[in-house]
Amino acid sequence: MSELEAELRKAVRGEVGFDVTSRALTTMDASNYRRVPLGVVAPHDADDVAAVLEVCRDHMVPVVARGGGTSIAGQATGTGIVLDFTRHMNGLVSLDPDTRTAVVQPGLVLDRLQEAAAPHGLRFGPDPSTHSRCTLGGMIGNNSCGSHSVAWGTTADSVRELDVVSGRGERLRLGQDWDGAPQGLREVVDGELARLRTGFPELPRRISGYALDALLPENGADVARSFCGSEGTLGIVTEAVVRLVEAPRARALAVLGYGDEGAAAEAAAGLLPYGPLTVEGMAADLVPSAHVLPRGGAWLFVETGGESEAEARARAEAIVRAADVVGSTIVTDPGGQRALWRIREDASGTATRMPDGSEAWPGWEDCAVPPQRLGAYLRDFRALLTAHGLRGTPYGHFGDGCIHVRIDFDLLTEPGVAAFRRFSEELAEVVVAHGGSLSGEHGDGQARAELLPKMYGHDMVRLFERAKGVWDPDDLLNPGMLVRPAPLDANLRFSVLPREPVDVAFGYPADGGDFSAAVRRCVGVAKCRTTSAAGPAVMCPSFRATGEEEHSTRGRARLLHEMLAGELVTDGWRSTEVRDALDLCLACKGCRSDCPVEVDMATYKAEFLHHHYEGRRRPAAHHSLGRLPQWLRLVARTRTAPLVNALAAVPPFAWAAKRLGGIAPERDIPRLAARTFSRWWERREKAPVGTGGDLVFLWPDTFTEHLSPSVGQAAVRVLEAAGLRVALPPTVRWRTPSGGGEGVTVAMDPVSLLRGRERVCCGLTYVSTGQLDRARAVLRRTLDLMEPVLGTAAPVVVLEPSCAAALRSDLPELLHDDPRARRLADRVLTFAEALERLAPDWTPPRVERPVVGQTHCHQHAVLGDGPDRRLREAAGLAGELSGGCCGLAGNFGFEKGHYEVSVACAEEQVLPAVRGAGEGAVVLADGFSCRTQLEQLAGVRGRHLAEVLAEGLGASG
């Protein structure tokens, strides 16, 4: 243990982490920059903060304050000690509705404050798009704004008082009239009054530099306001008194369509006299599906408020009448408004990929100009992009003249980095020429501080340095930011990554086959760190269950980044730090859809486990659960299911089996079906395959085949009732004659006959445990078996959502060298998709019952549930299914050591929904894992939608 670490452990009550994982998780924020800290401290209180500063001052080690780590300019990274306020100093101390103030700790997430204020009709005005995970301390440090700043201003406008520890350890209470000012600050200001009165541009979003003009006598000598936006370089906030505003009782959202972004930008300032709450702009490049928006190539999102819905709508209608638009719509439904705002909020992530899939980066994320100059500035900005051969899609706070943009800089090569510097220098001059600020929201950090002399001149920057010297004479706090800055092209996080593609098993088609590019997808916006799953969202259940960064999608991506870098995590694929972080990944695939940049941690986990255990002994659960299809086929062939069930019911035998298999002792072993689905199929009386409607092949997945054959039986009944012909895939390998076609007559391969019957398998259990060589072998065998099916036009209906998702996504990515994989993936339909596409005129039975349950996480992430919703509605099944993850997640919840997290995930949404269901409600759970979790934790039998519809068809004939 180092002397510094030992002294910190002795001095503070909070956690001190000098281990590889703690440091790796904080090497980056949401910017282009990376710096490796010596250690991380999670202080318990202000005393801990003061103690850390004292120890670090003695050792001349810098200190960086960090909240949610969503800063985009690099100011939440550092080489010394990082203070993590999210673990302990994250409380709402008090809220006073009468004075409309709240006392908050720096690690409090903004949404938690909003939730507390809402019952009183109040809210905190600023609301960045990261409101679900950014902290009040970080917002004060960056002087954050958000979409409602045209109505409620910046964070500085909402701060009353601040408790701060200065660089020298002095505890100060900052307020107006010089309250709390460190000794010497007033003398600095009084000697520069003329410069301070003339040296700052007048615009609503001037965030760059220190706000020393707030210390002018005519501005109330407001030390607290001046401190906002100082990026942790002057002192450490330990508590804040903030002002709340009255929230409108009703809101309306007018979406105004324009021909292009230039027209939208020109129009924005003209809408401000109407008193809108927001004037946000974005172009078609960032809209995944423009059909939900009115006609146009760019849009303004203009929100209005009122005492009633009618009043809010009337104000929105007045704005529409005043605007010269191509198309418009007004939305008053809160759900519809949330859906539209989600498009805008996700832009910070979606903008990181250009339409052709190439990467784009921050760095010039949020310049601001006077709103009246925005159109002219955008034209010059576009011209500069073109001159440098760059692309970017501006969006952002048009009403405040603040533009966000991600640009496709080449930050991987020396010439590309040099071009990045040239562009940055030239754009700074364009911004200044329009009377703007280099930063209009996210601060200067390392990205822009070097260029502050272009905006303020050298004399003003020297004044900033003098102010910094008063607050922090030892340059202890976040050095390299704002004054005496690090170069904007140093410490780039990409420079440490391997230049040659890493040898991997999956194809990573969206990333050009490059695993490093896949890992680079995580830009740190941290949507995975939300503490509650909103609506149908899934990501990231393990973070919500544990609250630990290493168990978030971002945390795991950071560890993988460091593994590839090899500087901090030095043992590559053998890393225990990466393994332990991935251990609690449920492979729910939620990040594949909920992450704005579609990070696919389930695939990365499978890839890592494949390499980590290559040539090494695997955990017992990888054999017992990962090879589950093999064991269940063996039981079926030997017809020993009754014996296995009997033994599993005897506690000593069950205990021994779970211990040997690495299964959680708290779990019950599911009962096997006495008769498999395939055996039922072979013995049923059925119509010949050659007559009737469209032919479909029903996939006998492992769970339907051996554990829930009733689901398969019900599906057959419903599909046939809908007029479809049902067949099962072949069980012997065939040699397909040339041509193919609609028929299924093929020639047998005599060698295959000697092997006996085989079964198709999606390989899911092998993939989820990282047995990718085995998964490939199983999938190639499956493709061999499916050859005659691929020679027809028949689709493949898969009842188990996780198996359908594996066939749609894992199969073509794992067997990217086999064209049959894509052909099969494209044939896969869910049960509801098959009925909707192949039997559009069929009317399902009217069940007329309420439903509760949970949309399977793989269905949400990969397959989509639109057809399921429509089928439920047609059957009279009323109600919405919950989001999140059931927590069992295939093998995850059965593995030893995962039980508590598994239960915590279930308790988040699905278990409360089921417990609160009214009498007669149908509990829907299409996934076997979901049904098992409900049975074992709630004693409730969940049902597949096929079972509910089959029951509705009436008694069997």
Image: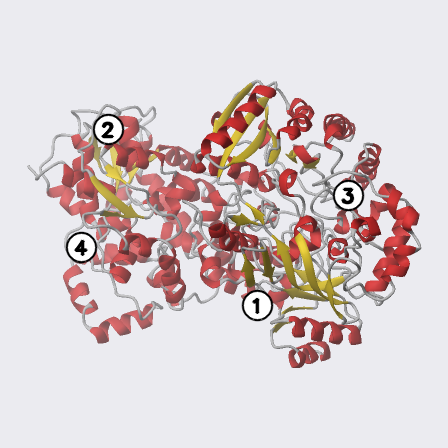
Query: Disc 4 residue type?
Result: Ala
Q: Position of residue 713 (x, y in %)?
A: 17, 42
Q: Looking at the image, tell me whether mark 2 or mark 4 is earlier in sequence order.
A: 4
- SS at mark 1 in the image: loop
Residue at mark 4: 673
Q: CA distance from mark 4 to mark 1?
A: 49 Å
Earlier along the polypeptide chain: callout 4 or callout 1?
Answer: 1
Q: Residue at x 47, y 53 (%)?
A: 540
Can residue 788 be seen from the camera position used here?
Answer: no
What amino acid is labelled 1 in the image?
His
The amino acid pointed to by label 2 is Leu
Q: Which mark is residue 695?
A: 2
Q: From the image, which quarter does the N terminus lie in?
A: bottom right
Nearest the camera: 424 or 755?
424
Label 3 and label 1: CA atoms lie apart by 39 Å
Q: CA distance from mark 2 to mark 4?
A: 27 Å
Which residue is drawn at the image coordinates 88% and 58% (left, top)? 466
Query: Mark 2 touching mark 4, by CB under 8 A?
Result: no
Q: Residue 650, located in which quarter of the rendered image?
A: bottom left
Q: Which residue is mark 1?
A: 88
Tell me which residue sits at (76%, 43%) in the image: 206
In the image, residue 558 sits, relative to residue 729, either above or below, namely: below
**Label 1 near label 4: C-beta < 8 Å?**
no
Q: Which residue is mark 3?
A: 417
N-terminal-most mark, 4 or 3: 3
Query: Marks 4 and 3, Cα distance to the nearest angstrom?
Result: 62 Å
Mark 2 and mark 1: span between their CA atoms? 60 Å
- Badge 3 density bin: few <14, some 14–19, many ≥20, Cα 10 Å: some
Do tag 3 and tag 1 residues touch (Cβ < 8 Å)? no
Label 3 secondary element: helix
